Amino acid sequence: MNLVLALLAAAHLNVFGASSLSEVLPRLDRTARYQFAGSDQLAFQIREGAPADLFLAASPKYPRELYAQHRCSKPVTFATNTVVLVVPRANPARIRSVYDLRRDGIRLVVGAKGVPIGDYTRRLLANLGLTSVLSNVVSEEDDVKLVVAKVALGEADGGFVYRTDVRSVGNRVLRIALPAAAQPTVQYDACVPTASKRQAAARAFLRRLLGPAGRASLRRAGFRVP
Amino acid sequence: MRAAFAVCAAAAVSFLALPVVAIFLRVPPETLVAQLTEPAARDALLVSLKTNAIAQALVLAIGTPAAYLLAANRFRGRSLVLTLVELPLVLPPAVAGIGLLAAFGRTGLLSTSAAFTQTAVVLAVAFVASPFYVRTAVAAFEAVDATVVDAARTLGARPWRVFARVALPLAAGGLGAGAVLAFARGLGEFGATIMFAGSLQGATQTLPLAIYAQFERDFDVALALGALLVAFSFTLLLAVKWLRSTSTSTFHFAISTSA
């Protein structure tokens, strides 16, 4: 039984990726097994012993923490992103700019604190002097795709997501530009968990991601590459 | 032979008890109690109590007459209606969540603005918990001795009086047990709530949602809330047993004596 499980597991590389990478990674490599979730949740699972071979986070924070605890290799940056405001295509709250979010009764959905998109959203609002709009938040979601879904469904009036998230739901949401000066640095870092038994394969995947093929895929998906 | 049965029984009981015991062993009791004063824990407790109280009141107020009607009448399509009432018992909570969104969401069938409010929590709780009450209540009313009801009627009692003074008191034990079961299920509601009501501390974040939100941030708070729910549920189930034993009428959960 254990041998069968080991063989089954050995055939695939377990890649733990931030939700915002859920479209681009399978296109780059179809053979790996992916688990997509909030980066904070993935880091928690890795600390609790989940069999991750590669950790691709939407923030430098969690790979750095794991590295400091000797639980993963030295993090490398492989992409950057920007935060955008999306509203349902019908735009029921008639939001034209981020400043409209101050109006009472707006239903805003954001990432929870600790989830990368949640932390970036709070930083962005602080940069804009708009932290008061957080009083219009009706739900705090555990990863960015849940924010996307609630806006695309038309249940929320607006939500902060990554630029790259808009592509998959482009026909259901409108993107509202944000002042570039207020953008937080959205940086994607990767590391190989020290507990992984497939270090070589994980490093090969990472090399591919950092190489021309990976860079091209990331760029096509709307990421910027360093 | 006997020993084999005993081993199976011991295995089953310890398998079921182990995770529950583990919650209490992982953190000492005084720490558990201290964690409950955390703002996230306190808010979740208040949200859970408020939304469940309202949902329960609705379930009892609407479910009791509905169950009485279903128990007293035989009509075409009755088993269909009973099956519909039972459906949320076995429906995956995620299905309940998208169903509620499709029905009560802003772009849904009735296009209400309930999503992401405490109303949404109440609706989610009522949806998943009410079958526990209604199904038990139907069985409890069915178990009321028909000759007693007939006697009241022939003595000239009007239908309302028969219901209020005869059927209701005789079914009270079963109704109480059903209400407690529904309350226990409602307190634990998670899937439908997180999809339909979202999760916001102090507004829609109930105890189970707070456990989920806290488990990677502050495991001790998650454990403390878990321990609280275990204690609640255990007490409620004990109450069901007590209500059943004091019940004047026997009833069978989720089994209709005649369909």
Image (spheres, grey):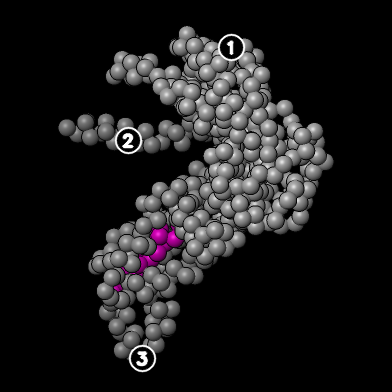
B156 shown above or below B252: below
B135 shown above or below A14: below
CA distance separating discs 1 and 3: 85 Å
Percent position of residue B259, x then y: 25, 67
Query: For mark 3, what is the residue?
Result: B156
> Which of these two is toward me, A200 or B39?
A200
Label 2 SS? helix
Considering the whole magenta stretch, tell me its main secondary structure: helix
Label 3 SS? loop
Query: For mark 2, what is the residue?
Result: B12
Query: For mark 1, what is the residue?
Result: A73
Q: Chain of mark 3?
A: B
Disc 1: CA contacts within 10 A as few (<14), some (14-19) or many (>=20): some
Label 1 SS? loop
Question: Looking at the rendering, which quadrant does residue A78 occupy?
Answer: top right
Q: Chain of mark 2?
A: B
CA distance separating discs 1 and 2: 43 Å
Indicate left or right for B85 with A145 as reference: left
Q: Which residues are magenta?
A: B129-145
**Residue shown at 55% from the left, 63% from the top:** B111
**Residue shown at 52% from the left, 15% from the top:** A208
Q: Chain of mark 1?
A: A
Question: Looking at the rendering, which quadrant does residue A61 occupy?
Answer: top right
Judge if badges 1 and 2 mark residues of a common chain.
no
Judge if badges 1 and 3 mark residues of a common chain.
no
**Residue shown at 57% from the left, 59% from the top:** B106
Percent position of residue B65, x then y: 42, 73
Q: Are marks 1 and 3 in contact (CB under 8 Å)?
A: no
Closest to the camera, between mark 1 and mark 2, is 1
**Residue shown at 65% from the left, 14% from the top:** A68
Q: Is residue A54 magenta?
A: no
> Which of these two is toward me, A26 or B252?
A26
